[in-house]
Amino acid sequence: MPHHAQLLLLDRDAIAGLLTPAIALEAVSTAFTLRGSDQGRIFPVVREALATGGVFGIKSGDVASRDLLGFKAAGFWPSNRELGGEPHQATVILFDPATGRPRAILDGNAITTVRTAAAGELGLRTLARQDSASVCVFGTGVQASAQLAAALRALPSLREARYITRTGQPDENFAARYAALGAPHCTLIHAADADAAVTASDIVITATPARGPLFSASAVRPGTHLNCVGADTCGKRELPDGLLQRAQVVVDDQTQASALGEMQWANGVACIQLGQLLTGRTAFARAAGDITVFDMTGLALQDLVLGEYLEKAARRAGVGLSIPWPWQA
C-alpha cells in the first residue's frame, strides 16, 4: 500500500557482496538480447559539460515485459583526483513503471565498471578469434584493468598482455592490479611503441579519455579484433581514420554509437548491433583475416538489468538499507 512503501538503498559495500563477473555477464547478455529482440528501449542520452570542468550524463530506458524502468546518472569529475577520490561517479535508480515511485537507489560506480567489462567480455566471446594469443591495452585506469581481466576470462589462449601508458612509462599500480588477477600463463609487458604493440597483438583494447587516434591504421594487421571503450561522448575518439572502413563493425546501439562512439567519425560505414547477432536476427561470419571492431558506448539497459539483478538478490538476502518512502497524501 502507498503508506507502506519502502525504498531500497544499496551502497558500494552492499553491491560488492552481491556482484560477480558471472552475474554481470549474464545480466549484460540479457540486456543485449532484450535490445536485439526489440523488448528493451533506450531513451535519448543526456551528456553535458559542466562549469566545474566535469561532464554529467543520464542514460535511461525501460523493458515493459519485465516491469523495468530507470536511469543512471553518471559523469566525470576530474578534480576528484585532488580529493583522493574516483573521478567517475554514477548512481542507478529503478522505478515502478506502473506508479512512477522509486524502488531502489544503487551506487553505480561498481555497476558501471563491471557491466562495461562484461560487455567487453561478451564482445570478445562473440567476435574475436578464439585462438588469440596476445592483447594490447591502451589505458591504465580502473576500466582498462577491468577490460584486461575480462579478456583473460573470455580468451584463455592469451599468453602476452601489452599495455600502453600516456606517459610512456610503466605504471606500477596497473601492474599490481594485473598481478592480483593471478594469470601466470599471460605475461604483462609495458610497451613504449604503440604501433609496434598493436602490430604484435591479436586483440586491441582502448580504454582512455582520448580525443584523438592512439595508433596508426597501418599498424592493425588482418585478423585483429578491437574492443573500443573510451569514445562515449561527442568529440572523443581512439581509432585512426580509415580503420573502420577496413573492418566489420559491431556496435552496442547504432544511434548511440553514431552520436557518441567511434562511429561518429565514420559516417556511412555499415555496422551491426550486437543484440541482433545474439538473437540471430543478423548473421555474422568471421574469416581468419577479418578485422573486427566492437564500438562500446554503454547502454542504459546494461545498468538497469544488472541493477534489477542486484535489487532482487539484495531483497532475498536481506542486504542493504530499506527505508520508508510513503506516498504523498
Image (cartoon, helix red, strand yellow):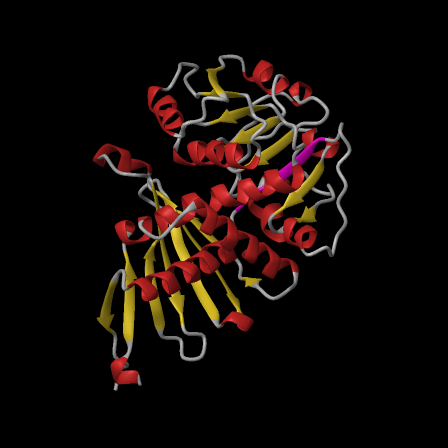
Above or below 231: residue 72: below
Q: Residue at x 73, y 33 (%)?
A: 245
Q: Position of residue 178 (x, y in %)?
A: 40, 26
Give the tally of numbered discs: 0
Q: Is residue 248 left or right of residue 262?
A: right
Quarter the C terminus occupies:
bottom left
Q: Residue at x 74, y 31 (%)?
A: 290
Above or below 36: residue 161: above
Q: Position of residue 313 (x, y in %)?
A: 37, 61
Residue 283 sits inside the magenta stretch: no
Identify which residue, 194 or 212, lies in the foreground: 194
Residue 295 sits inside the magenta stretch: yes
Q: Residue at x 71, y 27 (%)?
A: 223
Residue 267, located in which quarter of the rendered image?
top right
Quarter the N terminus occupies:
bottom left
Above or below 193: residue 149: below
Identify which residue, 191 or 160, lies in the foreground: 160
Q: Position of residue 152 (x, y in %)?
A: 51, 32
Q: Residue at x 45, y 75 (%)?
A: 97
Q: Is residue 206 left or right of residue 75?
A: right
Identify which residue, 264 or 99, lies in the foreground: 99
The answer to whether residue 299 of the structure is visible from this angle is: no
Q: Position of residue 77 (x, y in %)?
A: 33, 41
Magenta-tinted stretch: 291-297
Residue 72, located in which quarter of the rendered image?
bottom left
